[in-house]
Amino acid sequence: MKKSIIIFLVFMGCGALAQEAWFDMGEDRLPVAQYQIVVPLYPTAYELKAASELQKYVEMMTGVKLVIADETVPRSVHEIVLDHSAHYPVAAGSSPLDPDGFEISISRSAILITGGAHKGILYGLYEFLEKNAGCRFWAPGAEDIPKTSVIRLPVGHFAGKPAFGSREVYYAGMDEQDFADKMRSDRHAWKGGENWGMWVHTMFSLVPPEKYFGTHPEYYALMGGKRSKTQLCLSNPDVLKIAVEELNRRMTEKPGAKYWSVSQMDTYGYCECDACIAVNNHEGSPSGSVITFVNKVAAVFPDKVISTLAYQYSRKAPKYVKPASNVNIMLCTIECDRSKPLESDTSAGSFVSDLKNWSAIAGDILVWDYVIQFTNMIGPFPNLPVLQPNIQLFQKYHVGSVFEQGCHGTYSENQELRQYLLAKLLWNPGLNEDSLTSAFLTGYYGAAAPYIRQYLDGMASALQHSGRTLWIYDSPGQETDAFLSREQIRTYNDNFDKAEAAVADDANLKARVEKARLPLQYAILEISKKYITGQDGFMEQSGTEIILRRDRKDQLAEFTMRANRYGVKSVHERGLSPDEYGKQSSLFFQNAWCRHLAKDKRYTLVKLPSPKYSAEGPGSLTDGKRGSTNYYMLWQGFEEDDLEAVVDLGSPAAINYVGAEFLQDLTSWIFYPEKLSVSVSDDGKQFREVAVFDSLQFTDLVLIRETGRQIPLSDCRYVKFYARNKGKCPAWHIGHGGKAWLFADELIVDKRTFISPSQIQR
């Protein structure tokens, strides 16, 4: 059924401006004051909001405050209609509009805006205000509403509907419902949205391990011959029964919700029991057992939609089983490179290949796309050029809904521009992205816009010319040979200096430019942690001492102050407030430089670190640089392998201290080594053990710790370090059965005149 609202604008005696306000329709110029707003006799909430918004913005533009009346008022000579009524009834045989779609008819006698059953009327009203009245909505609290006596309206019929049935842009600005409505963006994720009863990673909500694992471990995944609390065993009939019963209970509590997620947990470790493996082998993907299970659930609830994830291990579509007609597939792009469009990779196993295969068998697909760098949410992330081609790809394969995951609850890099572009392109992927960007920058940054544009374009161009990939779990320190080189940063700073100068007399615009500069300030600080010393580091030579650079200290203080001022609640997806970041950075600055006898000495490794986590390559474990909690910089990572290194001091030396520093980050599967032993040798062949540290277990979620001790004075040339990796994630860990990581950043050999405390934590 079409929904719309009738608007009659009547003369209210609003003074000179009101009497001189006109609707210009080419050959006709009609006084705005002759109209009034009319809603249906029993209006919906969206119809009432549309009428109220029209009243507000017309008054802001012209000074005329329009009366809102219902359809029982007599028909006027001139009307604006936002809904069919007795004045303009629905034509016989007309087709219903898309739930969010609308139609706008403009003629001398009436302006008719009709909308679909969801928010079509509201979206039609905002289309009218933007396209016909010249209103612009950039961000919450940032609107351009023209003050005018003439609103020019083109005579004719116009229609609009979204490219995707559901469009969610997950940024903090969209937390404001009024702005989300103006951007035509839905709100479902973790919001208790009107259509969703449960939202992703729900298996353990349905069959809680704390309730069942102790007595029924067979309900959970078999991994390496042991049951573990990673995923459910989807072939177990009791698991299906319990899940259905719990779903039924929840649906009774929330009967209006249509979508219910029955989806894997956010970890690996799917079941390897004979029954599950048989299904997966037959289907050629672990998604086989997922879809088989979810189809059985969907059969019990034919009037609901059961949603499940195609995520990480289940992203590949099954060969034979097809999702039931009431099953929704959430297909995720988490592993993909953001430096180029998704469609540029058409290889077997690529996202495009998986999208194509899912679209061939599933009638209801939601693409979960990632548009932010989770490890550094305030850091530069030049993926803007791929937003439009990726959305166009989703449309090409008939995706029904798109969820663009930025971040909510905190300010993040270029948030205002990103949420604006994504919302506009999700409605119409064919819009001119360059024009959208230019319009936004001019409207939001004023005279600073050209310099902000130079900054954004320069960064995107530098990434493309570098040929590097762009991942959602990288860091600024990894991009110094891509888009964050010293020369580029100098140019970016010049861009922002000019931008700030251009709006120096406008406090509002200056604040927006300062906010936009935060990612660059953050990047400079993070890059300084990579180099520590030198032109880009945070320490400098002062006589015979190496001291903290004053400018870096000031930069950290300024970043912290501005980040707090402009709504940065967290710089990392796990939560790290500006104040916490400032404290951690200050502590890092104090401890990052380590002088000792093994500094810059050669060493050999039995097994090399992962290429992804190799710090600055050979020599990183004796370079005197200590890492921060950002494990992408300065740390060498060993997946499942032990660390065994022999340091060559070059010549015999007297030592009385040995130690090593390690990282623990349990959410990233990084564990402190279970054991550390240190041995010394004169010839590099015969070693004698001088220190052993057993049972190194810590419960801290994130921990950096130096494990070491003073030993009897020894003369030696070679020092061997052996750190035992946990190997596999333990049973209590969410990644149980998966490969554990060991991260080290410094092997320390020294002669000290003081007693060093054992197991130093920082």
Image (tube, helix red, strand yellow):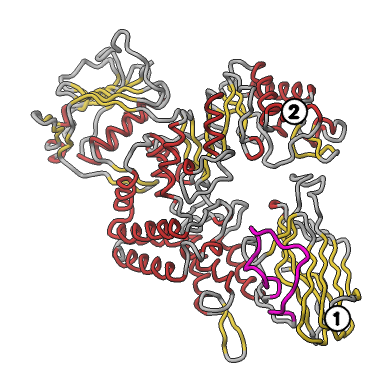
Q: Give the answer, above or below, for where 63 lies relative to 481.
A: above
Q: Nearer the viewer, mark 1 or mark 2?
A: 1
What is the x, y in percent for residue 443? 30, 50
Residue type highlighted by circle 1: Asp
Labelled disc at residue 398: none
Q: Quadrant of the C terminus?
A: bottom right
Q: Amino acid at mark 2?
A: Leu
Secondary structure under the numbered disc 2 in the rendered image: loop
Residue 672 at what x, y percent from top left? 78, 60
At x 36% / y 69%, what residue is drawn?
494
- What residue does disc 2 label? 234
- Is 215 in the magenta? no
Element type at mark 1: loop
Please tell me whether residue 13 is drawn above or below residue 107 in the rendered image: below
Q: Residues within 10 Å of mark 1 (few under 14, many from 20)?
A: few
Question: x%, y% of residue 13?
Answer: 16, 33
Q: Is there a contact, CB below 8 Å, between mark 1 and mark 2?
A: no
Extent of the magenta region: 598-622
Residue at mark 1: 683
Relative to 147, 668 lies left or right = right
Q: Is residue 41 visible?
A: yes
Residue 630, located in which quarter of the rendered image?
bottom right
Quadrant where the N terminus is found in the figure: top left
Q: Does residue 451 appear left or right of residue 588 in this picture?
A: left
**Residue 204 falls left or right of residue 437:** right
Query: How far separated are the C-alphas under marks 1 and 2?
Result: 58 Å
| Mark nearer the N terminus (1 vs 2) | 2
Residue 603 covered by magenta stretch: yes
In this orientation, which residue lies closer to the viewer: 355 or 501? 355
Query: Is 94 rendered above or below residue 243?
Result: above
Magenta segment main secondary structure: loop
